[in-house]
Amino acid sequence: MRIRYKKWARPELLQSTFYIDTPEERKGKWKEFFKNPNNPIHLELGCGKGQFISQLASENLQTNYIAIDLVDAMLGLAKRNIESAYLEKKIETSNIVLTRFDIERIPMILDKNDNIQRIYINFCNPWPRGKHHKKRLTHSRQLEKYKTFLAPNGEIYFKTDDNDLFFTTQNYLEECGFEIYAKTTDLQNKDIFGKNIETEHEKMFKEQGILIKALIAKRRI
């Protein structure tokens, strides 16, 4: 998603108590950032404007969350959405952190000591041209990187509007030793997540009559 430059975004992020600008320094030590370091850590890759993570994290204080994106403007909007969600519930932002980083290089900021229990990948770029498939966040090359910090039996929660990406992602997961134990080609009528939190893209696609595809995969020990 393209977004206009927002000159206020970076200054606001740098002043935020839940934004980290140097994530490389946290590698293997992410749990130390949180007020409750013994809680499990879940990770969202490509958090965008933060509508999803703001609701998820503010409703699940027993879990710690890391949300990553590469664009300051997106992260600035995510910061504001998170603040709004927590303020509405009158709670502190003690279980969430935002950071800016290139997901293709994610092993530089996370390792097995971080023991990530779950990864959320929502409506990532499908990169439809064959020569670009390796850029997909669910491609085998990326999945192998995630395995360097995803806990044994750790999960991947994935949603997309793109048919090809949905079906090829299943192949990628199986190739990399993941077990798919829940999937649907119509998330609206079969909620495999128990309580689905809609993203901005998800609402837009539903209005257009596009079915949302989703799956849950578990890393085999």
Image (cartoon, rainbow, N blue to C red):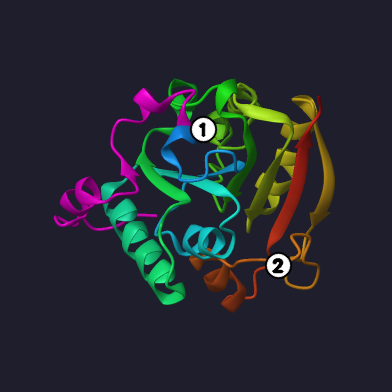
Nearest to the observer: residue 166 or residue 84? 84
Is 199 in the magenta?
no
Answer whether residue 10 is magenta in the image: yes
Which residues make up the magenta segment?
Answer: 1-30
Left or right of 83 in this view: 151 = right
Amino acid at the residue labelled 2: Lys
- In depth, the one of 217 and 170 nearer the eye is 217
Quadrant of the image occupied by residue 139: top right
Q: Where residue 103 appears, x then y in whole percent?
A: 46, 33
Q: Relative to the observer, which residue lies in front, 50 or 158? A: 50
What element does badge 2 sit on? Answer: loop
Circle 2 Cα neighbour tier, 10 Å, few/some/many (<14 / 14–19 / ≥20): few
Q: Residue at x 52, y 45 (%)?
A: 36
To which residue does mark 1 refer? 135
Q: Nearer the viewer, mark 1 or mark 2?
A: 2
Seen at 38% across and 46% down, the residue is: 98
Q: Bin the neighbour count of mark 1 within 10 Å (Cα to Cα): few under 14, some 14-19, many 20 and up.
A: some
List the residue tagged with mark 2.
Answer: 195
Q: Is residue 173 above or below residue 198?
A: above
Residue 134 vs residue 150, the one in the foreground:
150
Tell me where residue 145 appears, x and y as whole percent.
58, 23
